[in-house]
């Protein structure tokens, strides 16, 4: 995977003439989206929940369809799937959650209640329980609401010494947000060691961080008490599923706080037999996939777009790889707006409002960013032509 961050500044590319641009044909006899008046999109953004994340793998759909045809005892299947996933990911124990946010809630609840039924039924009333979670100030993020749903207060710190002073009888857990790893002063290994020194469980949120593949086992081996991954992002399992893995006693406690148990904070975070088998199948495929070949394919897609959109020397393209989350090749496109008089937001708007509708990576006003890894075969050329046409039209 060498040279991942190279610049792709090519000369004028020939128009993609004569190519028929069509969306992937649906295999269903019914076009449900058309019936409902919902417009499918080309996902040139990435695994964003608002764009329905990834498309499930054929092996995942096969597992889901298999599960849909039989009844089983749900807890028995939960146990069996958890055991299988734990073995695949070299964890002491594991469970399938209703997404990564669900895993945050259930992992926190596990640290608060153990398997004490009275405590499980009481939260978020924490009378008689620990009430605080330690977290680096720079690691605060929108999804820590899933932690606070249990009733805990997040106590912020910046240094290990400060954390030691703040830790006490009310400290239930320490949370590390992996996407902010470079921002905090306390890095992952030191964070784990600090938790062990304080005798406090440590949990890490790696929701979008399944690449590189070694991440799937790295944080278990590092010693985090609990590790979280999203199921519907790079793993391409069910979008409504996630993975919580780690210490056996804490996974047992998390399961006790989860559906199908009644009067528990996780009762609404239901995971049925289809998601259970689908998640297991996704991990089986992911752990044996040729990710080197996959990476090269993504780079080819980037070159198709980069070569096409370079309509003049005013346009520059750069391949980049996010440091942590979604650690796969992306394309950044910039242009001299004094020569090509259109803003990045306007190009994104025209792509969105066109036919087919195309969504690009949101959140940037100083470039147009393309995530190629969720594109289906041929869609790189559709994206390339549409951007080229827009830039040439102004």
Image: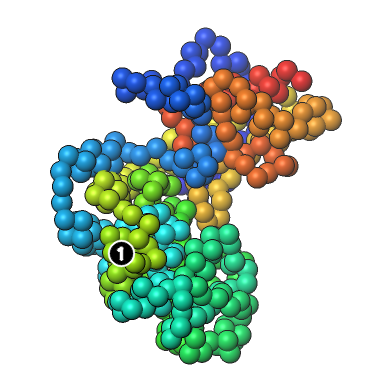
Please tell me which residue is depicted at 40% across the width and 72% down the height of the picture.
Answer: 109
User: In x, y percent, where is residue 206?
Assistant: 46, 60
Q: Tally the marks.
A: 1
**Rendered image quadrant of residue 54:** top left
Residue 278 lies, in percent from the top left, at 28, 46
Indicate the colouring scheme.
rainbow
Q: Is residue 87 left or right of residue 11?
A: left
Q: Residue at x 51, y 34 (%)?
A: 43
Name of the residue lying farthest toward the right: 338
Residue 12 visible in the snapshot:
no
Q: Residues within 10 Å of mark 1 (few under 14, many from 20)?
A: some
Q: Residue furthest top?
A: 18
Disc 1 is placed on an element classified as: loop
Front residue of 359/382: it is 359
Label 1 sits on residue:
262
Q: Is 311 left or right of 150, judged from the image as shown? A: right
Front residue of 71 and 1: 71
In-front residue for pair 273/301: 273
Question: Does residue 41 appear in the picture of this structure?
Answer: yes
- Please tell me which residue is depicted at 47% across the width and 32% down the height of the picture: 375
**Residue 317's image quarter?**
top right
- Quarter containing the C terminus: top right
Q: Is residue 196 left or right of residue 307?
A: left
Is 394 above or below relative to 373? above
Q: Position of residue 227 (x, y in %)?
A: 39, 66
Q: Residue at x 65, y 45 (%)?
A: 363
Q: Quadrant of residue 297?
A: top left
User: Could you tell me residue 220's position as x and y percent?
Assistant: 36, 68
The front one of 385 and 229 is 229
């Amino acid at each position: 995977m060498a040279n991942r961050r190279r610049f792709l500044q090519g000369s004028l590319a020939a128009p993609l003439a004569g190519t028929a641009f069509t969306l992937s044909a649906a295999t269903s006899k019914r076009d449900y989206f058309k019936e409902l008046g919902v417009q499918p999109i080309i996902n040139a953004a990435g695994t964003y929940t608002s764009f329905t994340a990834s498309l499930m793998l054929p092996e995942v759909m096969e597992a889901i369809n298999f599960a849909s045809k039989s009844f089983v005892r749900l807890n028995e299947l939960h146990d069996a799937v958890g055991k299988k996933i734990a073995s695949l990911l070299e964890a002491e124990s594991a469970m399938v959650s209703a997404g990564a946010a669900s895993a945050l809630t259930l992992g926190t609840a596990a640290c608060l209640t153990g398997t004490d039924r009275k405590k499980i039924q009481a939260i978020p009333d924490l009378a008689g329980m620990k009430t605080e979670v330690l977290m680096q100030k720079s690691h605060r993020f929108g999804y820590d609401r899933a932690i606070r749903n249990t009733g805990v207060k997040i106590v912020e710190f910046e240094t290990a010494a400060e954390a030691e002073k703040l830790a006490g009888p009310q400290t239930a857990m320490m949370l590390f947000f992996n996407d902010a790893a470079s921002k905090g002063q306390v890095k992952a290994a030191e964070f784990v060691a600090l938790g062990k020194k304080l005798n406090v469980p440590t949990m890490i949120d790696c929701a979008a961080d399944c690449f590189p593949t070694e991440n799937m086992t790295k944080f278990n081996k590092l010693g985090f008490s609990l590790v979280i991954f999203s199921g519907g992002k790079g793993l391409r399992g069910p979008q409504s599923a996630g993975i919580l893995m780690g210490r056996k006693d804490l996974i047992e406690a998390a399961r006790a706080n989860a559906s199908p148990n009644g009067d528990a904070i996780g009762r609404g975070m239901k995971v049925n037999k289809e998601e259970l088998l689908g998640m297991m199948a996704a991990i089986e495929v992911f752990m044996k996939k040729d990710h080197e070949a996959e990476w090269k394919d993504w780079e080819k897609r980037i070159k198709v777009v980069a070569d096409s959109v370079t309509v003049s020397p005013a346009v520059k393209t750069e391949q980049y790889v996010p440091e942590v989350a979604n650690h796969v090749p992306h394309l950044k496109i910039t242009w001299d707006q004094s020569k090509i008089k259109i803003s990045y937001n306007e190009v994104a708007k025209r792509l969105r409002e066109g036919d087919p509708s195309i969504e690009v990576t949101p959140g940037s006003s100083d470039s147009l960013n393309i995530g190629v890894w969720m594109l289906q075969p041929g869609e790189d050329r559709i994206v390339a032509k549409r951007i080229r046409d827009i830039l040439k039209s102004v």
